Amino acid sequence: MYCKLCQNNKKLMNSHIIPEFIYKPLYDDKHRFHVLSTYSAKGKPMEQKGIREKLLCTDCEQHLSKYEGYARKVLFGGVNIVVQNDNGGIVVSEIDYKYFKLFQLSILWRASVSSHKMFKNVNLGKHQHMIRQMILSDIPGHQEEYCCVMMAIKSGSDGMGTFIDQPEKGRIDNHVVYRFIFGSIVWIYFVSSHKIPKLINDFLLTEKGNIRLAVKDISELDCVKGFAQDLHHMGRFSNDIA
């Protein structure tokens, strides 16, 4: 069978689309978790061991594991970063741009190549090959290229780490976006061939290793629309949502 990343004919592993470390806080005493969708009235069945699929060979699993290992430490502790409050949001600095950006891209790409129904809304088309090459070559691209805006979410005064939501496709200011929720964070990926508006840079992971996150309550989880409307109210760009 052919590995989706290196495209060599090798034995494939049961690969996680969203890394295993994200699921650990979600497991119950039987090592199960709920998959939920904010766009559906019906709850998803219990899952075990995370969502996995035969996608990658052992070498490519190890290739992605270095990004995942670093991201786990950024998100859950274990690496030196600086976190500061900023007008109701959070500014994080001293992030390794290369490793964290490639972690972001690896999840988006894996969701696109997956055949699991959980990720049916993610289809990168021509961008899938380009992102694959970036991951395979360890090249994160510049900060506006396939960028990802992150928002921390909470319920009242508590963080929300207890669910993973089905990714959704949308459109912001004529850019295709994919919205993921996991790890108490909303991840909004901009996938476009045309230039991202300069003002969006205020919310991106920069090549200097800084990122600004808004903080949203769980009640505001119509996230793509809410994010666009926030920027519209700030006079930054239109709130055209498809």
Image (cartoon, helix red, strand yellow):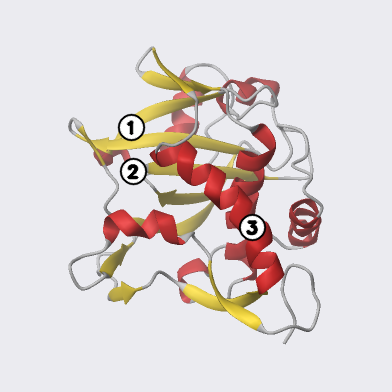
Q: Are marks 1 and 3 in contact (CB under 8 Å)?
A: no
In this picture, residue 176 sits left or right of residue 145: left
**Farthest top residue?**
87
Q: Is residue 157 above or below residue 75?
A: above
Q: Is residue 92 above or below residue 216?
A: above
Q: Are marks 2 and 1 in contact (CB under 8 Å)?
A: yes
Locate residue 85, reporting x and y percent.
38, 15
- The residue where tag 1 is placed is 216
Q: Amino acid at mark 3?
A: Leu
Locate residue 123, reporting x and y percent.
64, 64
Task: Answer with the quarter of the image where residue 35 lies.
Answer: bottom left
Which numbered marker is on residue 64? 3
SS state under label 2? loop
Q: Amino acid at mark 2?
A: Leu
Q: Is residue 46 above or below residue 184?
A: below
Question: Considering depth in this image, is 84 or 44 the residue closer to the camera?
Answer: 84
